[in-house]
Amino acid sequence: MDTFTLHANDPLLFVDRAIPSELLEAIKKLERWDEQALDMANLLITVWSADAIARANDREGISELQRIIHFTLHRASSLSSLPEEFRGRWQEASDMLEARRLSLAHADPEAQLNRTHVREILQWLLSNGNRELPQSELVKHLEVSAGRVTQLIGPLESNGLVTKRKQGRDNMLQLTKSGRGYATSAAPKSAMPERGFGGLFSIDNSVQSQLNFRIQNVIAA
């Protein structure tokens, strides 16, 4: 396995092989920033930050990257040899990581379950084998506008229930581990009128249909 260094011939090899602690140690040993070291550090900070922000709930990864960026921006050698261009880039990455950290800190997945269509979305994704599914298919399933589905998916993604990956002009959706748990949980009591009284006592389908029809009329009145 190649030893990690900020002067690697092929920096891309270390995007998946290296870990943040190795980057931190390499920066600590650096006497002065040069072009090769800057490019290597910039590549890793950029890619790793984007990955951490995109993951459903990577609080630990976000905090680790924030510590690396903070150290890099404030160490003595950085003050004299770190170009303003890179200082600005890494500060922007740190700001984005902080915004994501705050978003996760205030996340409340359970609060999302009472929003219209949310349980249906989670259960639809689960019933299709919990594989990635096109957002355009969800639009058809819910029979609402594409814009409305975008509004619904945004909070589900930020609260760690669903992941979203761009593919062409569409988005691919998939439940997270947390989302799978909520998808299989019992429906809220407020949903009971939609199911009729079948769970309370035994009635045939024709009678239950009439009861459901009357309930909907009362609700609509």
Image (cartoon, rainbow, N blue to C red):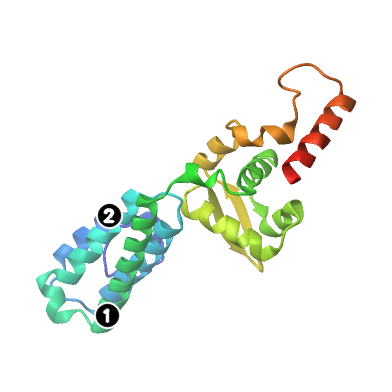
Q: Nearer the viewer, residue 135 or 142?
A: 142
Residue at far left of view: 76
Residue at far bottom of view: 84
Q: Secondary structure at mark 1?
A: helix
Q: Which amino acid, mark 1?
A: Glu
In this rendering, the answer to whether 142 lies above or below 184 is below
Is residue 145 shown left or right of residue 27? right
Badge number at residue 64: 2
Q: Position of residue 203 (x, y in %)?
A: 83, 19
Q: Nearer the viewer, residue 53 or 98?
A: 98
Is residue 90 shown left or right of residue 161? left
Q: Mark 2, residues whose alpha carbon is within 10 Å: few (<14), some, or many (≥20)?
A: some
Residue 187 visible: no
Res 103 → quadrant = bottom left
Q: CA distance from mark 2 to mark 1?
A: 24 Å
Q: Would you name the residue on which mark 1 appears?
A: 35
Q: Quadrant of the C terminus?
A: top right
Is residue 39 shown left or right of residue 209? left
Q: Position of residue 32 (x, y in %)?
A: 15, 76
In this rendering, the answer to whether 157 lies above or below 190 is below
Residue at far front of view: 221
